[in-house]
Image (cartoon, grey):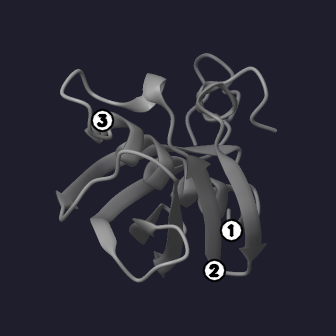
Amino acid sequence: MSDGSLPGLIGMEILEINGTWVRSRLEVRRELLAPIGYLHAATVVALADTTAGYGAWANMPEGASGFTTLELKTNFLGTAREGSIACEANLMHGGRSTQVWDAVVTIAGSEKKIALFRCTQMILYPHEKRTPGVHS
């Protein structure tokens, strides 16, 4: 599903989608680092937002046609230069018009947190076709 898009480009791997939580990981490589040699903030945000996005897709209400990120916030607690990072996202609110997801990004295989992330996803629905001059 992510081939040919940003998650595939950066090498993101979805490990598990289980109801209202999703796990993913990403191998840190030179191309994902900032010029100063540490993991670029955008890499961490991409991992967390995409992980939450897979969860939003798996939990869309009946009749929904898609979703879009409405708001996001990230608190950075650490960084990485090598190895892998992991993400676990959990659905905190699953309504008809919005979902709120919390995610924690860690050094893979450890408890060391490098970022706390929260986003709100707006659920999209198909537009109804209306006949001109007819109001409902």
Q: Nearer the viewer, residue 133 or 119?
A: 119
Amino acid type assigned to the residue bearing label 3 in the image: His
- Left or right: residue 23 compared with residue 102: right
Amino acid type assigned to the residue bearing label 1 in the image: Asn
* Residue 130, x across and y down, in percent: 66, 27
Label for residue 59? Answer: 1
Dot 2: element: loop
Q: Earlier in the sequence, mark 2 or mark 3?
A: 2
* Residue 8, x across and y down, in percent: 69, 31
Q: What residue do we see at 68% from left, 35% from top?
A: 128
Report crowding for label 1: few under 14, some 14 to 19, many 20 or more residues within 10 A (C-alpha): some
Amino acid type assigned to the residue bearing label 2 in the image: Thr
Dot 1: element: loop
Dividing the picture into quarters, in which one does residue 66 lie? top right
Q: Is residue 4 above or below residue 120?
A: above
Foreground disc of the pair 1, 3: 3
Mark 1 and mark 3: Cα distance apart in space: 29 Å
Residue behind mark 2: 20
Q: Nearer the viewer, residue 40 or 20?
A: 40
Foreground disc of the pair 2, 1: 2
Q: Quadrant of the N terminus?
A: top right
Q: What residue do we see at 74% from left, 70% from top?
A: 17
Dot 3: element: loop
Q: Nearer the viewer, residue 100 or 131?
A: 100
For the residues bearing labels 2 and 1, Cβ distance under 8 angstroms: yes
* Residue 119, x across and y down, in percent: 35, 59
- Left or right: residue 80 compared with residue 107: left
Label for residue 40? Answer: 3
